[in-house]
Image (spheres, rainbow, N blue to C red):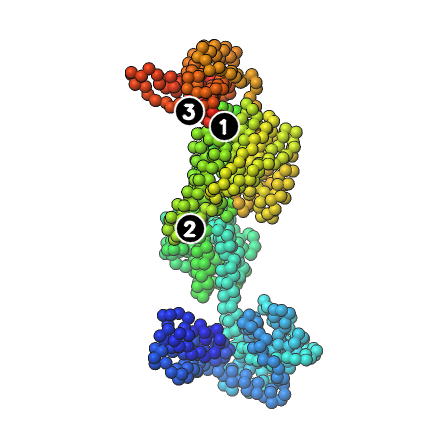
Amino acid sequence: VGTVLATRRPTFVTGREHFTDQLGGLACAGAPVRDPLSGQIIGVFDLTGLSSHADSSMLTVALEAARGIEQRLLQRVTSRERALLQAFHEARRRTIANGGVEAGVPATELLDRHDQRILEESAAALISSGRTGLAEVRLPRGRTAVLLCRPVTSSCGVAGFAVEAALPAGVLRRLTPAAPEAASPVAMPCRRPAVVSTPRMATPATTGPPAEPSACTGPWLLAVGEPGIGRLAVRARERLGLLYDAGACVGTTLDVTRTAEELTEVAVPRFADFAAVDLPMAVLLGEEPIRVDGPLRRAAIAGVHEGSYLRPAGDLITYVASTPQARSLMSEELVLEPELAKATGWVAQDPVRGEKILAAGVHSLITVPMSARGTVLGVVSFYRSRLQEPFEEDDLSLAEELVARAGVCIDNARRFTRERAVALALQRSLLPRGLPTQYAVEAAHRYLSARSGVGGDWFDVIPLSGARVALVVGDVVGHGLHAAATMGRLRTAVHNFSSLDLAVDEVLTQLDDLVGQLHLDQEEAETGSREETGCQEIIGASCLYAVYDPTTRCCTLARAGHPPPALVLPDGTVEYLELPAGPPLGLGGQPFETAEVEVPEGSLLVLYTDGLIEHVGNRDVELGLDRLRRVLAHRGRTPEQTCRILDALLPADPADDIAVLVARTRALDAGQVATWDVPAEPAVVSRIRAEAITRLTQWGLEELAFMTELTVSELVTNAIRYGAEPITLRLLRDRTLICEVSDGSSTSPHLRRARTTDEGGRGLYMVAQLVQRWGTRYGAHGKVIWTEQPLTPL
């Protein structure tokens, strides 16, 4: 069958000539079945048997069967149409005998299916107009065709019109209509050419003699029919065109409200003068509608003019049971009210408004329940006002088809809205809801979701021991629930690794291992699981991790496939920090390098994801960085003010998520830090303890003296006994009192519960009970044991 349709000629296929092995034992003979009037292929006759019984006579049988089908199709043509055809051919024969037709190039060699459709539509419009004469039709590629509409009347009195077409070589060729007596056995007056109003037709040719072409196709019969039948054909074509446009124009977005608006825009004014779509709030919010007998929200309305008094978009409407809309929702069937003035149930909704609507000229109504997957989603109302013809039964099928197509699109948009809402809720629950309290930096942030779906960008501010703070910005490749969930896992992992006081490069190494493990988990999962769930595979992530120490004003940074941060100095100078470009997370096998930068107090650290510098209309990274530099080049801005300025830089409808974190650095005053170098001698413990108490008194923290004295004594004694030189004690007066004892050993103390017979092991346990938090962090040359106490005793 496919071969016949492709070659447009009879075909005989046997044995291994078939494309599939399953048909290898069969023989097939096929012949095209053509429309007896137009010659177009409308079907295929296929004769199939076993290859062992194959015979070339099968093709003859198929051809005879196809010709028989065509003959039966011709017999089905009505007697009126056969009479018109006979009259046309008789007029055509007489015209040829008088030398009125000139042979030329066959039209089939110059026209394709699209050209033929244009000519057929124009011919139907000519016949429906009931006018004779010439008309010019413009075809693609600068070509022009001429249509001649001539009257024909059969010997039995059937009157109609025949349309011939000719294709001149670039200029019009005048086709002289046959004389009335030669046009048909029964004379009909030949009127002057008139303007034919069709979408694809220009002004008809005039009666003046145009230039004769050097070559022209011979005129061929295009269509024969009566004006009434022609009007039905034009109307049918208009309906098909409306359905085609609806399929192309409705559902261009995954927004419920916009899809409803597109339905009303397509229906008005070609089908109705006013169209309104009413949906329950559950559908607009993306939820599954349980019942639609409650209030409906008018999602969209369109009309040919203002002042119809129909309820505007956004109104909440509760239809009474007698209205056509309520009846459609309850019965799930279409309701036709050809004369609204006589529809008492419709007026009962709002008698005053109803009278105004009738006075505005609205006279006919069709209501259609909108449904998809067996669930009613809402109701659509079509009104007529300027169109004088009321809605008829024939309009019901068109209205139903329009709403059915729109219902599928709205249901898809509803489901997308629900999935997006779920993904956004998940994403927002995984992102920080607020920034933690800390002294090291003053921070502000911005987050903008992509239009295509929820992404995996994130940011974080994590307080660390020793008054330090970690600034994090990351980006998971991909969109959707899977990207958001992966982002949550990575953000949680960063918190865990930061709580262990791992080095900056070690944090990225651990994240790299985690993303690599996620890859392995996906590869071990079944291949079809992602297709069934719709999850996108996460192919990588990028991250920028920075730790700022306010006591030294030093910032340690490392990045994994992430854009470099911007540093805005207090004088407004902007520079991008030169960091080693580590590979994206998930590749594995590559170490990450760190960079240390001294940051003056009051500087701004700007961390961002690539969506800020790469978006639609600006895919050049260098241009994006230059633009960001110009925006940031200003002195004296706070982080929040900087974020507001960046709002103007953010695209209104970004293709990718955008996360921005701006932090203004602070520094601890020298008076807030006290440091002692401790010799490895137990005798100095009492002196160090006394000096620490003196410093607390200077800070006005005498209430913390007792607990601090015990803490300093225990930690310094342990460092002297179990650690290695150099040993240092440091007290920091931040929002908490921080006590740090560092030594050159990597041996970590362990908290344990001492037995009754043990002589030691109780000191660290006692310290843990006295302080708010404590822990250990490791450096390149030893470790630091730290504690934190609230400035006000609990």
Give the alpha-carbon distance from disc 1 to disc 3, as whole Å: 13 Å
| Left or right of residue 190: residue 770 | left
| Left or right of residue 38: residue 209 | right
- Residue for badge 3: 747
| Left or right of residue 758: residue 104 | right
Q: Earlier in the sequence, mark 1 or mark 3?
A: 3
Closer to the camera in the image, 142 or 345: 142
Callout in the foreground (2, 3): 3
Q: Is residue 312 visible?
A: yes
Mark 2 falls on what kind of element? loop
Closer to the camera in the image, 335 or 466: 466
The label on residue 534 is 2
Q: Is residue 643 visible?
A: no
Q: Are marks 2 and 1 in contact (CB under 8 Å)?
A: no
- Which residue occupies 59% across, 42% down? 613
How packed mark 1 is, by other alpha carbons closer than 10 Å (few <14, some 14-19, many 20 or more), is: few
Q: Position of residue 477 (x, y in %)?
A: 49, 45
- Residue for badge 1: 780
How packed mark 2 is, by other alpha carbons closer than 10 Å (few <14, some 14-19, many 20 or more), is: few
Q: Position of residue 692 (x, y in %)?
A: 48, 13
Specify the amino acid type for callout 2. Gly
Specify the amino acid type for callout 1. Ala
Give the alpha-carbon distance from disc 2 to disc 1, as whole Å: 46 Å
Q: Earlier in the sequence, mark 2 or mark 3?
A: 2
Location of residue 306 with respect to 162 vertically, above or below? above
